[in-house]
Image (tube, helix red, strand yellow):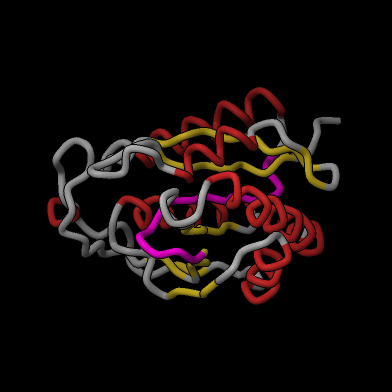
Amino acid sequence: MATPYVFLTGFGPFLDVELNPSGELAGALDGASFDGAQVSAVVLPVAFDEVAPAYRGALAALAAHGGERPLALLSMGVHREAWFRLERRARPQLTSTKPDTGGRSAAELGPLGDTELHTGLDLDALAAALERGGAREVGLSDDAGGYVCERTYYEVLERAAELGVPGLFLHVPPADLVPIAEQRGPVESLLRELVRQARAAS
């Protein structure tokens, strides 16, 4: 029987973010185990038209290799503040004016779907897990930013619904405000709680 796994993604550098902690954390946690579940991680491109195909392709490759669906889907991105931000929803219409790494903006995209999508996870319990892991400040958000992060979260929640597993997006702080070494403990604690909730829901 294949080992249960959490599919984890982060992002590489973009715009003025030369060191993206979400991608660094994903790479560092790839292959780690939490309560019998293994992390399978990839780093996604910060590009509106590339991120969904890259996400689906990575998921399909994992399914072909292991033959099982993941326990849960977790994606991470970086925001501008010194706190961890759990996202409740992904909206179908993106609003950011920032260009992606290819120079494309959200205004060039059509709607991603007909309705906004929401995670069904217990975010209060997940916030508490981040704090147990050492996060100094945690918040819940209804605005995933309107950029490639939100485009990814929409994809995550669509695939999560299709697979019948929970999906989540976490914004982590910039590395110059919270060193990446200090971010790993909170993310590991979050993963343990995510595995617990996923198993309880299955």
76 in the magenta segment: yes
Q: 77 or 133, which is in the foreground? A: 133
Q: Which residue is drawn at 53% across and 45% down?
A: 180
Q: Which image quadrant: the C terminus?
A: bottom right
Q: Which residue is drawn at 74% across and 58% down?
A: 198
Whether residue 123 sits left or right of residue 111 in the image: it is: right
Compared to residue 104, the image places residue 165 above or below, namely below
Compared to residue 9, the image places residue 170 above or below, namely below
Q: Position of residue 9 (x, y in %)?
A: 52, 42
Whether residue 197 sits left or right of residue 147 in the image: it is: right
Q: Where is residue 185 in the image (x, y as percent from the top left)?
A: 68, 52
Q: Position of residue 117 (x, y in %)?
A: 45, 67
Q: Where is residue 52 in the image (x, y as percent from the top left)?
A: 38, 41
104 in the magenta segment: no
> Image quarter for residue 53?
top left
Q: Which image quadrant: the N terminus?
A: top right
> Image quarter for residue 47?
top left
